[in-house]
Image (cartoon, helix red, strand yellow):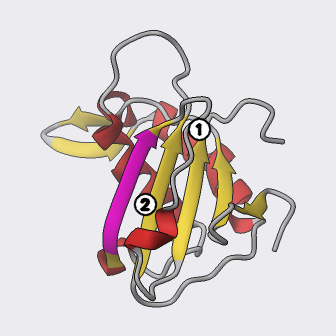
Amino acid sequence: MGTDCRKDSAGAEVIHLPYPPSINRLYRSINGRSILSKVGRDYYRAAVPVAEATGINVLGPYVLAITAYRPDRRKRDIGNLEKIVSDTLTKAGVIEDDSFCEAIISRWACSGVAVNFSEAAADLPVIHVELGAPNAN
């Protein structure tokens, strides 16, 4: 396990990643083709090495748990984070492929709230990702 990973109270691996750009800024359409934008390339360039450094490698089915810290007071759709996180974990080799994801549990971080992600996982490995966590590193 690398320095950017710890276990949560339920024993799931926790990976701290920077808060991603909005899905609308991640891709650009050029001549009818969707390509990764500079913002997207910059995000993956920053986030993938962090995930790689954990040394986690899950083959086969898994559960993805996302805890996101709101970067500001704007309204945000937590569902838009799932694809970016899954793609980051795939690019980093943490997961074999996001098609093996059996369940996704996403929540906004709140002080005093404890969530046991492993209860929803049955016997599958749980990968817990925190986005934009204050004082994560």
- Is 110 left, or right, of 77 in this rendering? right
Q: Residue drawn 44% across and 64% down?
A: 64
Is the residue marked by circle 2 packed among few (<14), some (14-19), or many (20+) residues within 10 Å?
many
Image quarter where the N terminus lies is: bottom right
> Mark 1 highlights which residue?
42
- Is 102 left, or right, of 124 in this rendering? left
Image quarter where the C terminus lies is: top right
Real-space CA distance between mark 1 and mark 2, rounded to the nearest whole angstrom: 16 Å
Q: Residue drawn 67% across and 44% down?
A: 46
- Is 130 left, or right, of 27 in this rendering? right
Q: Could you say which is closer to the camera, residue 121 or residue 135?
A: 121
Residue 137's tag is none
Q: Residue drawn 29% across and 42% down?
A: 79
Specify the quadrant of the image occupied by residue 75.
top left
Of pointers 1 and 2, the one earlier in the residue sequence: 1
- Do labels 1 and 2 touch, CB within 8 Å? no
Q: Residue drawn 37% across and 56% down?
A: 105
Is the residue marked by circle 1 packed among few (<14), some (14-19), or many (20+) residues within 10 Å?
few
- Local SS, label 1: helix
Tell me the amino acid under the disc marked 2. Ser
Tell me the amino acid under the disc marked 1. Asp
> Mark 2 highlights which residue?
86
Q: Find the magenta span and give its range.
A: 102-107
- Local SS, label 2: helix
Residue 108 position, x and y percent, is 46, 35
Residue 118 position, x and y percent, is 50, 71
Instruction: Identify whether 87 is placed above or below 69.
Output: below
- Is 53 left, or right, of 118 in this rendering? right
Q: Could you say which is closer to the camera, residue 92 or residue 75?
A: 75
Instruction: Identify whether 125 is placed above or below 110.
Output: below
Residue 65 is inside the magenta segment: no
Instruction: Identify whether 119 is placed above or below 60.
Output: above
